Image (cartoon, helix red, strand yellow):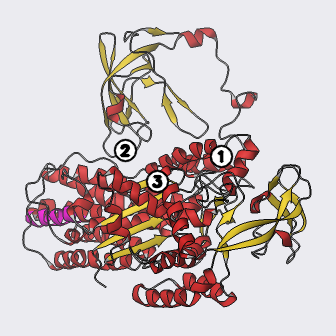
Amino acid sequence: MNFQRTLVTAALPYANGVLHLGHLAGAYLPADLYVRYLRSRKRDVVFICGSDEHGVAITVTAEKEHITPQAVVDRYHPMNKSAFEKFGMSFDNYSRTSLPIHHRTSQEFFTHFHRQGVLKEKEELQLYCEKDAMFLADRYVEGTCPNCKYTQARGDQCENCGTWLNQTELVDPKCKLCGTTPVVRKTTHWYFPLGDFQKRLQAFIEERSKRDRWKENVLRYCESWFKDGLQDRAVTRDLSWGVRVPVPGFEDKVIYVWFDAVLGYISSTMEWGEQRGTPDLWRKYWQQEDTKYVAFIGKDNVVFHCIVFPAMLMAWNDGGGEQFILPENVPANEFLNFEGQKFSKSRGWGIDLQDFLKYFPADPLRYTLALNLPESRDSDFYLKDFQARTNNELAAIFGNFINRTLAFTEKTFHGVVPPCGPLGKIDKEMTATLKSLPATIGTLYERYKFREAVIETMNLARAANKYFNDSEPWKTSKENPEQCATTLHLCLQIVRSLAILFEPVVPFTAQKLWTTLNLPGTPSGEGWESAGELRLAEGHSLNKAEILVMKIEDQQIDNVIQALSGTPASPAPVPALDVKPTITLDDFKKIDFRVAKVLAAEKVSKSEKLIKLQIEIGSEKRQILAGIAQYYKPEDLVGKSIVVVANLQPVKLMGQESQGMLLAANDPAGKVTIVSVSEEVPSGSVVR
């Protein structure tokens, strides 16, 4: 089918906790890789997500903390939204289901089904807590599983054996709020007849899977549900938090979260259109047949996105009028483990995204996760593997080729793209490889094979390093300058191509590289196919190169491991052995601490850690070198008033003299923070 646009959604995360790395590998990073690739291909694409803010998980958290459910979601929604942004997620809209626009959308669907006669009203038995005077929703009751005898089974499912349960089937049930034994009472709920759609759903999945190559793991999950036979599912529940049921007589009930959450994709797209001043824009992506809808999820959401949501859209479409499109593909991933164990909030095992980004930049994490995506089976994330991927691949292969190309161009051709002369055999082979890769890598993205796409992209950097070595520009610069110019010309073309092809994976690094190449706009704005072309013009001036990828030291990894284990990342200052040898007051008085103002700062060439600072101490100007490049940008230091040791014997570092030392503190995570003072304190002032 010839699609004109693409709608991409990523599963709405619950706003009752923070995001961890498993969430990223399941739904979010794959979706972002795909969307960034499509944008680079100049496709019409909209990327939608948001917080799932209803359901018992929210109210349980609120009960535990003695706050309102609204306070819970108001805490976690901005935290997760900010973490996503720092990670580089490129959502067009990140909404929330507590917004009025979502409540209206959910109620409109419910009312539409009610008027059509789709919903069934049923009287049923439900557990009721007499002490708390309330019907108990699934997660408010806990008991023994009748199947495996697990003693902490929930009212809807046993996490131990996976069996779906009716809460009245639990043995020895207890109210989780007060611990008392609930009684059984009658209540009335509305049900969606999911079983009525089974044949249509099977035909839908069979047709879509042939057309867009659905993943085997997704098909297996669907087949298991169909084999057991689809049953009616309740769409209302007895709760005070959620979307109110818009039917007279049921105002004290809310719409079941499984029903309203998937509609969050539609309401988020509506909000996006309103923000752009085009309220009906959402219809273009949800109601035009030439739109391709791809839903990225984790495997625990397969039933809702492959069966439940399509059935809801089918039911809506049966009512005539405006028609909704169904998902073209649902590329669900399996689970990611951390250091060989499952992420577990209750056991405190794993690492949250926001905490991880306090230790390391986003791009190395994106790269390592992309190579460990659980696309067909569960996979593992190890910190040492993260370090090795960063140091041995991003830095030693990709970063090394970039750095040596730019440094050699600066040294030999004064930072200007040299002319391209006649091509030899290895030159032609390299340009042929370059020309073919955008299509090769693009096909892998189109087929949702993201791990392979990233591997092929890094293979270009590998091939480029080999080309550089085989061409020996350090020799031809003296023996055959024309050939040296051709080699560097082609290497710079590859640098540009790598910025484009790596942009979906490491967007911050790619943009930094694009700026170094002195090119306007963004890598994706240049167009994916152009990565196979030689577009850098002879004579084009480049900006000064910087280290693109910083290597990760063992101590940085150890700090994270120590933090996860609950032990301090640095030794406590109390024991005598952890304190440096005692000095006298006279010894201390020999050190001359002074306030200095930073006049200029720049990174030291060929050093990953050093920054060279020009400082003013009173009327005297000096130069000092400091190993702070991993924590500060040179431009952020200019104008700061810092504290330096003014009478330290000068030393040479990387061939440059350092005439003093600045004071800085190391926190338990190893982060360096410069000791600074108010700018009102004059430079040259004595610090005691």
Position of 265 relative to 597 (above/below) = below
Position of 159 relative to 561 (above/below) = below
Q: Nearer the viewer, residue 522 or 554?
A: 522
Residue 607, label in figure:
2
Q: Residue at x 7, y 62 (%)?
A: 419
Which circle, 3 or 2, is nearer the viewer? 3
Q: Nearer the viewer, residue 630 or 620?
A: 630
Q: How many residues crowd around disc 2 within 10 Å: few (fewer than 14), some, or many (20 or more)? A: some
Distance, label 2 to label 1, CA atoms, is 51 Å
Secondary structure under tag 2 reads loop
The span shown in magenta is 482-494
Q: Residue at x 63, y 51 (%)?
A: 16
Residue 263 spot, x, y in % from top left = 51, 64
Residue 297 spot, x, y in % from top left = 53, 69
Q: Amino acid at mark 2?
A: Ser
Secondary structure under tag 1 reads helix
Can you identify the residue that label 3 sits on?
Answer: 101
Total labels: the figure holds: 3
Residue 69, label in figure:
1
